[in-house]
């Protein structure tokens, strides 16, 4: 799971991070739907540091 999440935080831009988060959610939807839903719901909080 770390392999899916880590690239979100190493993205060069907020747009790239948002795309990677979407890809992670898509990959998690089938095996871990609750985790996918939590990650998707927390998208703004997860990506907040890209605003600085």
Image (cartoon, rainbow, N blue to C red):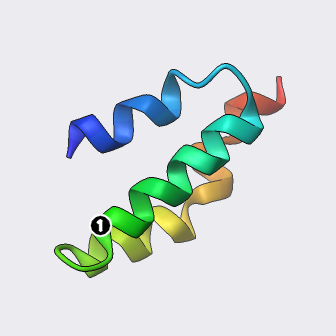
Considering only vertical position in the picture, is 43 above or below 18? below
Left or right side of 19 for 22? left
- In the picture, the quarter occupied by the C terminus is top right
Asked whether 41 or 21 is in front, the reply is 21
- Position in image of residue 43 (x %, y %): 60, 57
Residue 6, by quadrant, is top left
Disc 1 is placed on an element classified as helix
The residue that disc 1 covers is 28
Considering only vertical position in the picture, is 27 above or below 11? below
- Position in image of residue 12 (x %, y %): 67, 19
Considering only vertical position in the picture, is 37 above or below 44? below
Considering only vertical position in the picture, is 46 above or below 33? above
Q: Which residue lies at the image location 16% right of the left edge and 74% below the top edge?
A: 31
Numbered label tally: 1
Left or right side of 2 for 10? right
Asked whether 49 or 27 is in front, the reply is 27
Left or right side of 11 for 7? left
Q: Residue furthest right?
A: 52
């Amino acid at each position: 799971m770390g392999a899916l999440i880590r690239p979100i935080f190493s993205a060069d831009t907020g747009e790239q991070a948002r795309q990677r988060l979407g890809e992670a959610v898509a990959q998690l939807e089938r095996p871990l739907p609750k985790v996918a839903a939590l990650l998707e719901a927390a998208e703004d909080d997860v990506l907040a540091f890209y605003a600085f």
